[in-house]
Image (tube, rainbow, N blue to C red):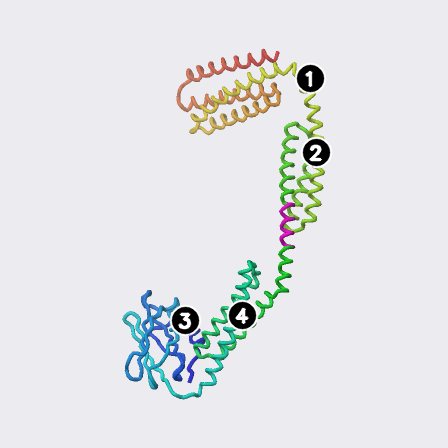
Amino acid sequence: MIIVSLIVLILLVPIASAYAENFIVTTNKNIYSVDEKVIVVGVIPSDSPSGYAVVIQVTGPDGKSCAVQNILPAADSSFVSRPVKIDCGLGQYSISASYTDLTSTSIFTVSSSQTGAGSRLELRMIKNVVMQAQEAVNARVQELINANYVLPADVVDRYSKGISETSLAAQAVDFGNAAEAKKQAILAIRDFRAVLDALSSDRLMLFEQNAEQQAGTNSSAANITETYNRLQEFYYRLEDLASKNQVEKGREFAIAASLLASSRQMIDDGNLQGAETRLAQVNSLLEGIRAELFSDTGAQDKKAVASTANSTDSSDEANRLANVADKFEQRAVTLLNETSSNPEATAKVQEALSLIARARSSIDQQDYDSARESLSAAYKALNEAKDLVDGDHGDGSNSSSSSSGANESEKNKSSGNSTGDKN
């Protein structure tokens, strides 16, 4: 008489282990035929120390040891033995399970009754059928792997499910649970048939065609992406050239940037034809900008040649003003290290540094009048910062006057040179 199927017992074991105060051991049936195997299941107390094995000993009707197994409990404190072969005669058997210093016992009977022969035959047939189905699929899969085929992901998933269901069916057979064995066998055979159908020669040919089409699509996408990257770099170079030559092409560059952005989105969305069209428009627009830029550059080169006679004087003036900017910048950096405790003085030095930077920009643009104005304002800010620092240090008016005198001398020297050069 079957008291509980192993599937139900396994489901109940974790629940029992959560509340178990006792060590429990039992079997999946009370009475077995001579040729059947016993499955021992149980639960150790949830508060038991971990890392030990459950030792199961089966004793026959004559009191002699019939079988011994060591089993590690699962994480939920349950344990299930491997099938135990019983060949110690007919009668009542006892099971003793030990875990550390804990012991639990149970009994079962082996009878000569053949009332379960039909059921056992059915279980063997179920197991044979499902194992044959698995072997057929294994052979086909191995054949394709040896031929260097890459199996589709969905087929691999279906194959894995079939293997898992076959294992569950075999386990149910070992437990004597015909209903569960049938259920898992049906699921396994269904999945194996689907795998064999997907791996048929006709399906594989279609799969190869799709793979070739996908490879072609990937190649096209790579080519269009390469074109996009090339045009993007072309765009940045032209924009930099236009800026250096002070050529106004803001509207054209804005249109090109918009077309580039939309083509990038189309590539990401898989709209390769649309992206290719947009990139052709970008290329045409950038080529037009390039032609105009080189035309403007040639005109500017002619102007530069015409003004060569004045270049020497301009270069000397630029050098003189740059030297003054260098001196003021060095002085500003020195003062900056002395103004850490005076926010007002620090702000003045930062103002001077900004003015010096502005002067350098004006020098680069040959706007020497603006450069002189910025340097003069920077000089004033540096003097004010120095006065604030001297006041913090308590140097008194003499020190301040001496510093101001020295600074005034430097200013007169700088201004004199600039004024003379300007005149």
Q: Nearer the viewer, mark 1 or mark 4?
A: 4
Q: Position of residue 246 (x, y in %)?
A: 66, 28
Residue at numbered disc 3: 14
Residue 218 within the segment the image draws in magenta: yes
Residue at numbered disc 1: 306
Q: Amino acid at mark 3?
A: Pro
Question: What's the mark number on residue 289?
Answer: 2
Question: What's the mark number on residue 136?
Answer: 4
- Specify which label sits upstream in the sequence, 2 or 1: 2
Along the line of sight, the residue nearer the viewer: 308 or 181:
181
Question: What's the mark number on residue 227?
Answer: none
- Measure the alpha-carbon separation of dots 3 and 4: 37 Å
Q: Position of residue 369 (x, y in %)?
A: 61, 18
Q: Position of residue 89 (x, y in %)?
A: 33, 84
- Measure the alpha-carbon separation of dots 3 and 1: 96 Å
246 to 73, vertically: above or below: above
